[in-house]
Amino acid sequence: MVLEFLMFKFGMRAFVGGLIVAVTCASLGVFIVLRRLSLISDGLGHVAFGGIALGFWTGIYPLYTAVASVIAGAFGIHALERLRVASDAAIAVLFSAGLAIGVVLISMAQSAPADLLSYLFGTILGITDTDVYLAAGLGILVLAILILLWKEWIGITLDPDFARVAGMPVTALEILFTVLVGLTVVVATRLVGVLLVSSLMVIPAIAALQLRLPFKKTILAALAFAVVSVVVGLQLSFSYNIASGGAIVLVTIGIFILAALAARFWPRFKKELPVGDWTHQCSEPGFSGLVPEETEKGQN
């Protein structure tokens, strides 16, 4: 039977939580890849691990402390950048610090908590109502901010220098974006685990970008790929008793391979995307520096 896991209450929770995570991750994923920050989700995932360990050590619900840790990590990355530490190096420092703090706190607890592996590798078929409610709340918050500042995100992604000249608070927006990525990492932790969370955020976006579609269609393609990956991965996990996080990520890799092959051999996707197709969405008054498609054609 197709999607037989939906016959069970735990399966419905997994399905709802998975859809929330898929939509949230894919929505940010395209921006992350285009800004060449693909490793930031991995770095913040390890910072979240430190927060999860702190939760186990203090007796606080681990995802609550994970939220606090990734927010602190987001500010920490930008604080290091202000000290003229390169972005990738700043991420590496926070990556190492989060992992080290987590290992130390777990060792101080004498024995590893029983469900620690579920946070490391994901166990979506075993999530609770609290996990779903937290994922829904954080997911709605992330998507609301993403939609509210849509043109600003496109601006700092496609032309950050002009966005700064045009008066946009680029530094504040970058910090906010990093915080959103961190919150999304927490949302996805119970689905695929902190060790695989970057895969769900990045791979569907990379697959969508292979198709060279206009920007909004690229976002929609990434959303579709992420949702399909979660649904198929859940079914494989339920049917063959395999780790749900690993199954979901393997499906995303399969989709990426198919998209890459389509881009290589299907003529529709072999053409180069005109720059104007992506920049015209920022062409409203007050943000004319990103050349709209019509202006680009006129100059030709």
Image (tube, rainbow, N blue to C red):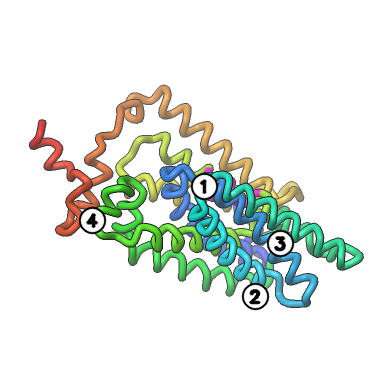
Task: Residue 42: say if magenta.
Answer: no
Task: Residue 200: say if magenta.
Answer: yes
Q: Which label belongs to residue 50?
A: 3
Q: Is residue 191 visible?
A: yes
At 54% across and 61% down in the image, what residue appears? 74
Please tell me which of labels 1 and 2 falls first in the chain.
1
For disc 1, the marked residue is 87
Q: Nearer the viewer, mark 3 or mark 4?
A: 4
Q: Amino acid at mark 4?
A: Ala
- Secondary structure of the magenta portion, mostly? helix
Q: Nearer the viewer, mark 3 or mark 2?
A: 3
Q: Is residue 270 above or below residue 297?
A: above
**Span of residues in magenta:** 196-202
At 31% across and 58% down in the image, what residue appears? 152
For disc 4, the marked residue is 166
Q: Is residue 234 visible?
A: no
For disc 2, the marked residue is 130
At 57% across and 60% down in the image, what residue appears? 76
Alpha carbon of mark 3 to alpha carbon of mark 4: how far? Answer: 38 Å
Alpha carbon of mark 1 to alpha carbon of mark 4: how far? Answer: 23 Å
Please tell me which of labels 1 and 3 falls first in the chain.
3
Q: Amino acid at mark 2?
A: Thr
Q: Position of residue 239 (x, y in %)?
A: 71, 49
Alpha carbon of mark 1 to alpha carbon of mark 3: how far? Answer: 20 Å
Instruction: Label 2, secondary structure: give it.
Output: helix
User: Crowdedness of circle 1 by 10 Å Cα count: few (<14), some, many (20+)?
Assistant: some
Q: Position of residue 36 (x, y in %)?
A: 46, 42
Name the residue at the left extreme: 298
Q: Amino acid at mark 3?
A: Gly
Alpha carbon of mark 1 to alpha carbon of mark 2: how far? Answer: 35 Å
- Say whether marks 3 and 4 touch (CB < 8 Å): no
